[in-house]
Image (cartoon, rainbow, N blue to C red):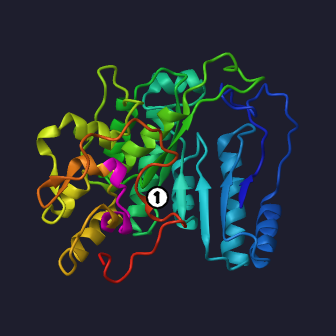
Amino acid sequence: MRVMQTNACSLSCGYCPTFCGGKVKRTALQPEEVATTFMEAHRAGLAQGLFLTSGIPGKPARAMDRMLAAVDILRRREGYGGYVHLKLLPGADSAQVEEAARLASRVSINLEGPGAAYVRRLAPEKDLSGDLLPKLEQAGRLLREARKPALTTTQFVVGPSGEKDREILGLVARLESERLLHHAHFSAFQPVVGTPMEGERATPAVRELRLYQAEHLLRQYGFRFEELPFDPDGNLPLDDDPKTAWALRHAEQFPLEVRAAPYELLLRVPGVGPKAALTLVRERRKCVIRGAEDLRRVGVDTARAGYFLTLRGRRLAPAPAAHQLRLFPHGQHLTQAPWRTPVPPCAFR
């Protein structure tokens, strides 16, 4: 259940319809109301977890206290031990960050942009280097030291402030490598009528997709930040997903022989995700791989992977696949999709 404890706000974020000058009806929930409403939904089987955020009407510490009070009621009075994602508000103090890390399963704070100037353009009252980033790092350290399974997350508004993909992913890569960030979210800017940035150009959705795909390469595929295939302008190419762009720029490393390539190199092949690569390495020891159909059975996207793979010395495709935009980042979303055929005990018949 996603709850915004109040949509009243004194900040003037240019992209947000609930900014201080927005013409929207304002309302607020008391901590008791948040806790009671969630528990009713939880007991009825309608909600498995809570995501709690808030606007900032006045002093940030007061709004943050109300959010913490709601979660405290859930934990202490209601005995709820399940998932709570708590959004830290800009201006929260260090003690509140500590309390959030103690009470919540996951803590997040939106960085909005990769540099102070970008953040000021989006949200004049927000301070990246003096507030947002230090609070995210503090929460990350606290959760890491507590050995909680979920760490922090953050979000970036992509496009209107002029930031580059290289800058966004450079910051994400550093935070993830230091285990201060579990993953990042990216939101392609879309202008909203009635906001200060309503006249700005919308950011293409494909740019958001490429950022998600690149972040997956860093977090799940063993890529280093320096290996990401940025164009000279500092952004990711839009015509190819980042793994395909990298592979086409490193033709000397391909093709790979399906029967012998190690897991780490199979992960570099477009169309091969972590689950498919692991299954392929495991099953090829006891089964004979006969052709592309056997690879498809374990989750390999042979249309994308064929040009970069050989089977008994023969390339599976004569040329790279044509450009095609994908709805989801390759990897977790695709390999866990419900329409995938389960891998049998011996995948290659």
**The N terminus - image quarter:** bottom right
Magenta segment range? 294-304
Residue 323: horizontal and vertical position, in percent?
40, 35
Q: Position of residue 90 (x, y in %)?
A: 59, 40
Q: Nearer the viewer, residue 137 or 295?
A: 295
Q: Give the left or right position of residue 71, taking residue 258 as reference.
A: right
What residue type is disc 1 on? Leu
Identify the residue under disc 1.
334
Q: Main secondary structure of the magenta part?
A: helix
- Quarter where residue 48 is shown: bottom right
Question: Height in image: 343 above or below 241?
Answer: below
Q: Looking at the image, which is closer to me, 348 or 76? A: 348
Q: Secondary structure at mark 1?
A: helix
Furthest residue in direction top, as rendered: 199
Q: Is residue 79 above or below residue 250?
A: below
Q: Position of residue 60 (x, y in %)?
A: 66, 42
Q: Is residue 231 left or right of residue 139?
A: left
State the residue at coordinates (60%, 19%). 201
